[in-house]
Image (spheres, rainbow, N blue to C red):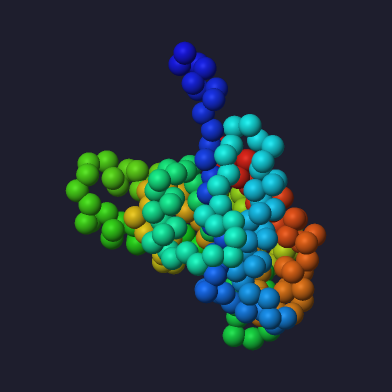
Amino acid sequence: MALLHAQTVKHVVVIDPAHGGEDAGVISVDKTPEKDLTLAIARELKKELAGNADMEVILTRDSDKTMTVAERQKYIKKIRPALVLTLHINAGFGKTSSGFEMYYPGFQEKNEALKKKTKKGDAGNENKYLNDTVRLSRLVQKNLDVLFPRKGRGLREAHVPLADNLELPVLAVELGFATNPEENKKLASGKTQKDIARALAKSIKSFF
């Protein structure tokens, strides 16, 4: 019975298309809102992973609806996934910024949060989640580098609101710049959205 159970266990992955509803996010140079681009890519990513029998993929939203960070966190906590990938589109002060970058809370921020915790073993768990996030980011970097040659901006430590109080790997990925006309045109393309989804799917598969 134990073996049968082990064979049926699935890795649950949450894909979070940032923004939605009243929160449009960044407005691109062609007036396309970030919320539409993140949702389109998230849907393609779910399709790419759908054929994996050992994986279940859940979107925090599958329509243009408003969801606060707190609502997303509550939903994620109910699901208890193995990892969360939150998708964003970047914006620069000018039209020349380009490429993709990733964010995670970082060890310093998490260590500060740990000081407020009392459960024994929390520190070890937090470090594991962060190490797993770094490992996932390296896979994403490798696979997105093919689509954004020499434009990878790396993994940066920053506050990721969605990761607050979530004890699991959470990686935020900024998929190009909506303020860059050339990059924005690519992001609006169905082909590019599928290519990005394939790269992210490959990264997630390799993670497990």
Q: Nearer the viewer, residue 113 or 27?
A: 27
Residue at 74% x, 69% y: name it: 188
Q: Is residue 78 left or right of residue 89?
A: left
Q: Nearer the viewer, residue 67 or 208?
A: 67
Residue 85 in the image, given as x and y percentages of width and height? 54, 54
Q: Is residue 3 left or right of residue 46?
A: left
Residue 44 in the image, given as x and y percentages of width and height? 69, 53
Q: How many numbered circles does the render carry?
A: 0
Q: Quadrant of residue 177?
A: bottom right
Residue 187 in the image, given as x and y percentages of width and height? 72, 68
Residue at 48% x, 42% y: name it: 82
Residue at 67% x, 61% y: name it: 40
Look at the image and tell me whether residue 192 can be seen. Answer: yes
Q: Residue furthest left?
A: 118
Residue at 66% x, 54% y: name it: 43
Look at the image and tell me whether residue 97 can be seen. Answer: no
Q: Residue furthest bottom?
A: 94
Query: Quarter holding the C terminus?
Result: top right
Q: Quadrant of residue 114?
A: bottom left
Q: Nearer the viewer, residue 80 or 175?
A: 80
Residue 109 in the image, given as x and y percentages of width and height? 35, 62
Q: Residue furthest top?
A: 1
